Image (cartoon, helix red, strand yellow):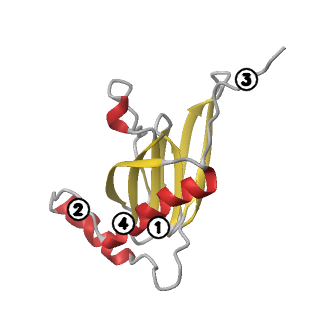
Amino acid sequence: MHKKELTSVHLYYGDLNMPKGFEINSDVLISKLFQENLLDNKFRSSKEFDKVNSYIIEYMYVQHEIPLRFVDTWGNYYKSKTVTQPLRQFSPSFPGETGNLVCLYGIDVSNCFIRLQYTDNKDVKCSKIVELKKNNFVIFPASFVYQISSFQEKNFNFIQTMIYDAF
């Protein structure tokens, strides 16, 4: 008699701990985010974004032995007391173009929660709520449906979304 696990779903999250002197300048990322959203400019990479992206790729490889290939990114800002419509980044019609992992990075966030919805191995619907804090990241399968809840009182929450292929 043999047993083999066919599916396994993982959630990765943590702090983006940069070495002293190499901290992320969130003002630069927020400026790029506004340029992208308000001026309808295509996201252009920056030194600050490259630091975030490199950290995520290296973290996943060193800590979990998962090599990643960067696919796409965009930033969003969320008003106080808002909840997004359900979001999903995976397209079954174009799986090679959509990536298979989503990373949400909290550029400048407070009182922000990510609700992940998925089905387990027994096809039972499950959900998990994860708090997203400033300079934190959450990585999950692109097949998950998720919602972002922004409950801060006065300011916006700024989140960078990154799509990766794990291979």
The foreground one among 153 and 21 is 21
For mark 1, give the secondary structure.
Answer: loop
| Disc on the earlier residue, 4 or 3 | 3
| Disc on the earlier residue, 3 or 2 | 3
Q: Is residue 150 visible?
A: no
Residues marked 1 and 4 touching at CB (< 8 Å): no
For mark 4, give the secondary structure.
Answer: helix
| Disc on the earlier residue, 1 or 4 | 4
Front: mark 4 or 2: 4
Image side of residue 64 versus residue 71, left or right: right
Residue 30 disc label? none
Image side of residue 86 versus residue 37, left or right: right
- State how far apart marks 1 and 3 are (Cα): 41 Å
Front: mark 1 or 4: 4
Residue 4 disc label? 3
What residue is shown with label 4? Answer: 50
What residue is shown with label 2? Answer: 44
Image quarter in which the N terminus is found = top right
The 10 Å Cα crowd at callout 1, few under 14, some 14 to 19, many 20 or more, is: many
